Image: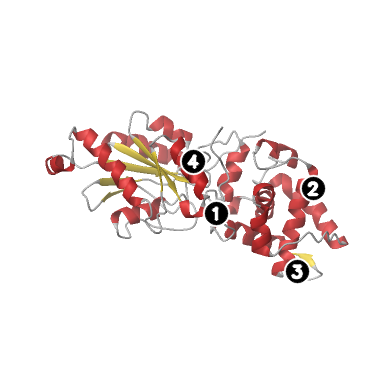
Amino acid sequence: METINWYPGHMKKTRELIAANLSLVDAVIEVCDARIPMSSRNPVIDELTTGKPRLIVLNKSDLADEEATREWVEYFRGAAVSLNSMTGQGLNKLFDKLDRIERDKNGVANDKARPNTRPLRMMIVGVPNSGKSSLINRLTKRRAAQVGNKPGVTRGKQWLTLENGMQLLDTPGILWPKFEDQQVGLKLAFCGSIKDEIMDTPDLALELIRVLLVHHAELLINRYGLQDSGRQDSASQTARSVLCDEAAPTLFGKSTMDVGEASSFPHISSDSTTGGDALSTMEEIARRRGFILQGARIDYERTARTVLDEFRSGKLGRITLERVPI
């Protein structure tokens, strides 16, 4: 399968920024998306931050399955905390771990010795749209960083001071230059870490629906009031031909994926009936929401945007797309 480059110039600049400033910090906070803890971990960061204490923040935990998040925290063996940066839930656990790193760095046994030691300096890194800026604002208790619901909001490095004296270096979100595993790119796209503008939205939503039908079909049914109507009128059949035969192979703007290649993704079945079920479900969602164009045609674009937005905002339910390896 052909690999894909994502913002190579931006990634190179951010990588150089991290490398140039790493000697200035004592620890690294890596912000991941709790819904995709592995796919949202940048392998480049592993390479760049070797030798530095690192904490993994499973952010957006309010959107992820609670049991799955607990399993991931255990999987990372004390190096991770789950957190909702919008409400601050889990922030105390993060500060506890940072305090421990600071004491270890300064060789002190308790907080009483802290006034005579240098405050901890940290670098915060993560993929775009992982919630880094929201976490920074929560840590500093002020709007210190720009926040947006699109990747690429943070533009350059910022040094910030926390109330307890710790110092924090913010960096732009960093994606690696190539995805050897196309499914990693898919899951990042589902969660909004890749700009929607460079992808075909109906195809992306169709793949997401295919995933959800396997383990979370009840959430789709409950959210959209679906039923197995089995409707396959001529207009629907025509739309299927166009969507499956022409649009599906161009998910990322080039010929990269077909239904058969989806078999490497744990939640996607390569069975042809699954593809048909996903498209039937997408069309039924459109009917239920009234997303119908002139001539009784399905508005795939509006339907796709609705499904993606409601998944990303948690309106579909708390969903984790990756489980701990067995």
Q: Are marks 4 and 2 in contact (CB under 8 Å)?
A: no
Q: Are marks 4 and 1 in contact (CB under 8 Å)?
A: no
Q: Image check: 160 left or right of 272?
A: left
Q: Image check: 59 left or right of 306?
A: left
Q: Are marks 3 and 1 in contact (CB under 8 Å)?
A: no
Give me the residue at 86% from left, 62% from top: 233
| Vertical relation: 303 (above or below) 172 | below
Find disc 4 in the rendering and name its residue: 71
Of tags 1 and 2, the one toward the viewer is 1
Q: Could you say whether the residue bearing mark 1 is in a helix, strand or loop? A: loop
Is disc 3 surrounded by few (<14), some (14 to 19) or many (20+) residues within 10 Å? few
Find disc 1 in the rendering and name its residue: 318
| Mark 1–mark 2 distance (CA, rounded to whole Å) | 32 Å
| Mark 4–mark 2 distance (CA, rounded to whole Å) | 40 Å
Q: Is residue 97 visible?
A: yes
**Mark identifier at residue 47:** none
Give me the residue at 77% from left, 41% from top: 271
The kind of residue tagged 4 is Glu
Q: Earlier in the sequence, mark 3 or mark 1?
A: 3
Q: Earlier in the sequence, mark 4 or mark 2?
A: 4
Q: Image check: 126 left or right of 108?
A: right
| Mark 4–mark 1 distance (CA, rounded to whole Å) | 15 Å
**Front residue of this view, candidates 88 and 195:** 88
The kind of residue tagged 2 is Asp
